[in-house]
């Protein structure tokens, strides 16, 4: 049962990454690309974590991919909000 849930979470994350990749290809906005990469890292991490470490998330290295994925989401949000085209700060 746990392997099925871990696989389901991994597949859902990869599907969400494909969803954001489609929007990136339509708009060419880096925001969507960062989100796609973040979800792919998270999906690969879930599958890899269950396959090789089981349920043991006690090691600090188990959280490094999550830190990278969530860091990319923060970078995407900051990058999107810093883009301005006018002098008054409006996009």
Image (cartoon, rainbow, N blue to C red):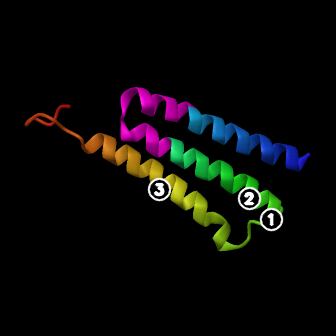
Residue 49 in view here: yes
Q: Quadrant of the N terminus?
A: top right
Q: Which residue is mark 3?
A: 71
Does residue 2 appear left or right of residue 19 in this picture? right
The answer to whether mark 2 and mark 1 are in CB contact below 8 A is yes
How packed is label 3: few (under 14 Cα within 10 Å), some, or many (20 or more)?
some
Q: Position of residue 20 (x, y in %)?
A: 51, 34
Label number found at residue 52:
1
How packed is label 2: few (under 14 Cα within 10 Å), some, or many (20 or more)?
some
Q: Quadrant of residue 56?
A: bottom right
Q: Quadrant of residue 57?
A: bottom right
Query: Which portion, as a residue range, is magenta?
Result: 19-35
Above-or-below relation of 6 to 20: below
Residue 55 in view here: no
Mark 3 vs mark 1: which is more N-terminal? 1
Q: Which residue is mark 2?
A: 48
Find out whether residue 12 is within the magenta segment. Answer: no
Which residue is situated farthest in the left direction here?
A: 87
Above-or-below relation of 52 to 59: above
């Amino acid at each position: 049962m746990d392997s099925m849930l871990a696989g389901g979470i991994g597949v859902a994350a990869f599907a969400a990454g494909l969803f954001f990749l489609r929007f990136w290809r339509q708009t060419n906005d880096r925001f969507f690309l960062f989100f796609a990469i973040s979800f792919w890292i998270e999906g690969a991490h879930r599958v890899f974590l269950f396959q090789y470490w089981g349920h043991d998330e006690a090691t600090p290295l188990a959280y490094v991919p999550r830190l990278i994925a969530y860091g990319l989401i923060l970078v995407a949000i900051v990058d999107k909000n810093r883009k301005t085209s006018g002098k008054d700060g409006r996009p």
